[in-house]
Amino acid sequence: MTAPGTDMDVTRTISAIQEYWGFDELRPLQAEAIRAGVEQRDSLVVMPTGGGKSLCYQVPPVVADRTDVVVSPLISLMKDQVDGLRASGYPAAALNSAISNDEQRDVIRDLQSGDLRLLFVSPERLLMPGFLALVHKTNIRAFAIDEAHCISHWGHDFRPEYRRLRELKEIFDGISLHAFTATATPRVQRDIVEQLGLENPNVLVGGADRPNLTYRILPRVDVQGQTLEVVRRHAGEAVIVYCITRKETETLASVLGANGVRAAAYHAGMDAKKRRRTQEAFSIENLDVVVATVAFGMGIDRSNVRCVIHTGMPKSMEHYQQETGRAGRDGLPAECVLLYSAADVLRWQGLVQRNEVEDGDAAAAAAQLELLRHMQGLCSTLECRHRALSRYFGQPYEPESCGACDVCLDEVEPMPESTTVARKILSCVARLEQRFGVGQVVQVLRGADTDTVRKWGHEHVSTYGLLRELPEKTVTNLVYQLVDQNLLERPGGDRPILQLNEQSVEVLRGEREVRLVEPKVGAVRRSQAEVESMEGVDAGLFERLRELRRELARERGVPPYVIFDDRTLRDIARVRPTSPETMRSVRGVGEKKLVDPGPAFLDAVRAHCAEHDLATDVNVVARPAPVASGSRPRSNPARDEAMRLFAGGASLADVTAATGRTLRTVAGYLVDYVQAVRPEGVEEWVPEIEYDRVAKVAADLGTDRLKPLFRALDGEVSYETISVVLAHQATLAPDGEPSENLA
Ligand code: ADP
Ligand code: ZN
């Protein structure tokens, strides 16, 4: 892995992510993508949702000191993105049809003054003559294309207006294009490269796996009850429930509502105003659960969705990946539950076949059936879900067990006496002479007293009432499990009946074992990630901070995540900072947010910790203050004192004693000092042997990320020491211009 460009670029990158976002280090692929952006080499970046794509196009214009354009099809999200960036002090703006003329004039003025780093535009707007002239005049040289799969026919969301983006390379000489997408099979990747006319692009494909998601696929026996149970596990959290039909969304939303859940339905049949209101309520956290058809999601940027439920099987792995992708975008653990019945497969197959009859496109139908088969495979096999998904998207999955799916968490237990139960079902089909459908077979097995049962005299067959002890929906699901495993046939047609096949006969003869699964109610285990994400977090404080965030968001008219995301709130509830210095150590607190809204959160922490007698300023990991800015006056007596003492050659221990700060915080001050003063050496604080060791490993690994270095040094050198050495090394780097500066 290589970090962005020259040493100078590396330093600038690190201080940018510290300053604006409060992050410590880049993820591996981000470093490469940012480098491509800074050096203006065409690139295609495929990273799963939540992988951190935005940073890849936000950082380069800061490092290279230029203005870049981001092309995005989601006008509804642009405003939030821009608000989010501005809240971090990052100069960004958007131009699209939703913006007033006055605003537009302001944006253009900022653009011409060169103050903007990012300008978001819709693809239509980008190619208007007036805008092209503006691009020319302001010498914009790099374009990020978000949701780049939209350019491909083979993608799941083709948009004709994306096709014209290839004109960019024809109109402007020497510009670079940087394409981004979350899901693209190799074919779509090739298509993107070709369609955009990318030249010798750096193609960076990240793992498709989302380790923070826990997948569960349960037999569907009671949609409402099972959905309610899962939703209750996430009380007060954001949940999206996907249903196949509009009617189902409405029924389910009202059932949830009647059970005290803040839920609403959302589907394409509702009028636009109502849809917008629902989306808005969800975004500002006035609504916890949205029960939707797949129409919901594209315009949603709530990063703390903790659970996505599918009440039926989606028709492809691509759809499943995309819809579950909306969970846990903040990187915190989230759950994805699919309620499965093989009846869904039959339903989709029927639909595909009907379409084929209508439009006679046999190839399209075959392709859709193929997609269905893969999805069915995921649902009906007991293999690690993470592994199965990764494989489908063409990637190896290393871990033996993921620890975050129902299979690996050992929640799926075979039903006791599976084979006997299967034989009861199969012999009932035989007794009914293979002339009846699922409904009747289930009624007979359960010993129901219905008109149809009496009409055919089925109360006299020997299998009548054999599965009396099981609920009707469970028996139905078991029948479908047999269909799923090819142990029973259910040919299509108007009145699908159940028939036996060779395998059924083997089961009946006792020559074949069967494994059926039963949903275990309330049997979920917490994944490792879930346990860790709450470690040291004071839950009461977390809720209080959420409330504060909601208030501030309302006051300012922005979505709550623009203030801080959940991950940052949890970190605050873990560290419980009472001073700006410790607050700075929290991931997600950049320099701007330290000033605003930082103090409001510090107050809340102080108040809560005093009331509940909680220790404060714990679990702190020091992060040095960024070098770059200089724009914000920072008054911090302890830091000033530390600087003075360091200048006099005081040791870390002395300064720690003198300032009363933790060693980590003081080490952060030392990094500041080194960056500001650029001393010739740092041997007062770091023994030469240790210094050389760190410098060598950093050079060998070609990285300046703390964690990998810490590991490579076998944990024998402290984080503090490593960061001081790196800071000093950075001062030795030649002071060059950032590479490929624009002429
Ligand atoms: P994507 O656009 O790929 O779905 P985002 O850019 O929204 O992903 O990032 C997902 C989450 O990860 C966000 O909460 C973001 O703040 C966080 N994130 C991104 N990069 C980093 C990083 N280097 N360190 C810590 N958090 C990061
Ligand atoms: Zn697994």
Image: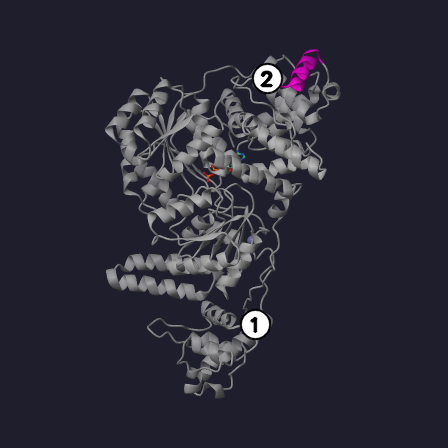
Segment tinted magenta in the rendering: 636-649
User: What's the amino acid at mark 2?
Assistant: Gln
Residue 473 image offset from top left, x and y in percent: 50, 70
Find residue 652 and report its image quarter: top right
> Is label 2's Cβ within 8 Å of ligand 1?
no
Q: Is residue 414 left or right of residue 147?
A: right
In this figure, which residue is indicated by the disc labeled 2? 675
- In percent of the image, x 38 and y 48: which residue is there? 275
Majority secondary structure in the magenta region = helix
Q: Which residue is mark 1?
A: 418
Q: Who comes first in sequence, dot 2 or dot 1?
A: 1
Residue 73 in view (yes/no): yes
Depth check, front residue: 587 or 46: 587
Residue 302: horizontal and vertical position, in percent?
47, 42
- Say whether residue 436 is magenta: no
Taking the image as drawn, is residue 705 in sight? Answer: no
User: Spatial distance from mark 2 to mark 1, Cα to Cα?
Assistant: 68 Å
